[in-house]
Every structure is written in C-alpha cells, then in structure tokens.
Image (cartoon, rainbow, N blue to C red):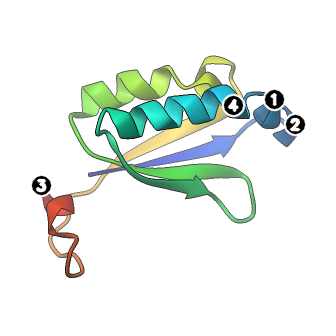
Amino acid sequence: MFILSLTYVKPQEEADRLMEPHMAWVNEGYDTGLFLASGRKVPRTGGVILAKGERTAIEAFVARDPFAVHGVAEYEITEVALTRTADGLDTLRH
C-alpha cells in the first residue's frame, strides 16, 4: 500500500481553480482500482490518498494529476508494508 501525501506549494486559490480537473483525476484513480481512500489535510494544506498497485504505475498516475502538472502541489509517495489491520480491512495487506 502507498500513502500519497500532497502539499500545496502555491496559494490555495490556485488549487481551487484546478479542483474540478483534480477531482476528475481522483475519480479516475478510484475507477481504475488504484485509490482506496482520500481526503483533505486539516488544516487544508493539501491532501492524502491511500493507494495500491505497482509503484511505477502509481508514480506515472500521480504525474498526471493537474495539481502536479501545474506545479500547485508536490507529492511524497511512501510505501507501507502493512502487517496488521482492523477487522474487515484484510485486503489492504496485499
């Protein structure tokens, strides 16, 4: 599993202008099965996405995010080898 942590590097207004295409990109991530969960950081300095798949595929997909393309946010991608999960979340360990 991967934690995709994005941090805004430009004013929030620029992120707001790109929010619609960014959310279309997020929806595509769910549709393709890469994304498991996502949301905004609090306070709103960026967001976090939980993803699964091959690192190269995730890196390529992240590079297509309108926030990344337009330099609004930077991504930190962290791979996590889960060894334990709560009941019902067993599939996250694969």
- Which of 6/20 is in front? 20
Q: Please say if the residues under marks 4 and 1 sit with CB atoms less than 8 Å apart.
A: no
- Give how far apart the Cα atoms at labels 3 and 4 are: 31 Å
Q: Secondary structure at mark 4?
A: helix
**79 shown above or below 84:** above
Q: Amino acid at mark 1?
A: Arg
Q: Position of residue 55 (x, y in %)?
A: 26, 34
The residue identified by callout 2 is 13
Q: Position of residue 39 (x, y in %)?
A: 57, 56
State the quadrant of the C terminus: bottom left
Q: Please say if the residues under marks 2 and 3 sit with CB atoms less than 8 Å apart.
A: no
- Give how far apart the Cα atoms at labels 2 and 4 are: 13 Å
| In front: label 1 or label 2 | 1
Q: Position of residue 30 (x, y in %)?
A: 39, 40
- Give how far apart the Cα atoms at labels 2 and 3 are: 38 Å
The residue identified by callout 3 is 94
- Give how far apart the Cα atoms at labels 1 and 2 are: 6 Å
| In front: label 4 or label 1 | 4
Q: Which mark is residue 17?
A: 1
Q: Please say if the residues under marks 1 and 2 sit with CB atoms less than 8 Å apart.
A: yes
Q: Secondary structure at mark 1?
A: helix
| In front: label 2 or label 4 | 4
- Give how far apart the Cα atoms at labels 4 and 1 are: 8 Å
Mark 1 residue crowding within 10 angstroms, few (<14) / some (14–19) / many (20+): few
